[in-house]
Amino acid sequence: MKTFTRILILGATSFALAACSQTTKEETNEAAESAADDTAANAAKAGDAIEKAGDDASAAIEKAGDKASDAIDKAGDKADAAAANAKQNTGEAIEEVGKDMQAPK
C-alpha cells in the first residue's frame, strides 16, 4: 500500500506540474499577444501622428504661399498706384513748364 500511495502522489504531482506548465504556457502566450497588440496600436498611433504632422506642414506651406501671394499683389498694386501718381505729377510739371515758357516776359 505504501508503494501505491507513493505512485499516486507522484502521479498527482506530475498532473499538477503539467497543469502549472500549461497555465504558464497560456499566460506567456497571452502576455506575448498583449505585447504584440500594444506594439501594433503604438505603431498605428505613430503613423497617425506622422500623417497629421505632414498634413499640418502642408497646410502651413499653403498658408505661407497664400500670404506671400497676397503680399506680392499688394506690392504690385502700390507700385501701379505710385507709377500712376508719378505720371500724373510729371504731366502736371510739364504743363507748368509749358505755361511758364509761354508767359510773356
Image: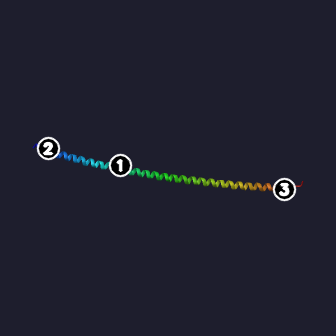
Amino acid type at circle 1 is Ala
**Which residue is situated farthest in the left direction here?**
1
Amino acid type at circle 2 is Arg
**Which residue is situated farthest in the top direction here?**
2
User: Relative to residue 40, is residue 70 drawn left or right?
Assistant: right
Query: How far apart, in angstroms, are the residues tagged by discs 2 and 3?
Result: 138 Å
Q: At 57% from the left edge and 52% from the top edge, which residue is drawn?
A: 64
Measuring from the top left, give residue 18's x and y in whole percent. Answer: 22, 48
User: Relative to residue 5, is residue 55 drawn left or right?
Assistant: right
- The dot on residue 77 is none
Measuring from the top left, give residue 26's x and y in whole percent. Answer: 28, 49
Q: Nearer the viewer, mark 2 or mark 3?
A: 2
Give the SS element for disc 1. Answer: helix
N-terminal label among 2 and 1: 2
Q: Nearer the viewer, mark 2 or mark 1?
A: 2
- The dot on residue 35 is 1
Q: At 56% from the left edge and 53% from the top edge, which residue is drawn?
A: 63
N-terminal label among 2 and 3: 2
Where does label 3 land, which residue? 99
Where does label 2 land, which residue? 6
Give the SS element for disc 2. Answer: helix
The local crowd at label 1, few if under 14, some if 14 to 19, many if 20 or more residues have their Cα within 10 Å, is few
Amino acid type at circle 3 is Lys
Say which quadrant the N terminus sits in: top left
The local crowd at label 2, few if under 14, some if 14 to 19, many if 20 or more residues have their Cα within 10 Å, is few
Disc 2 and disc 1 in contact, CB within 8 angstroms = no
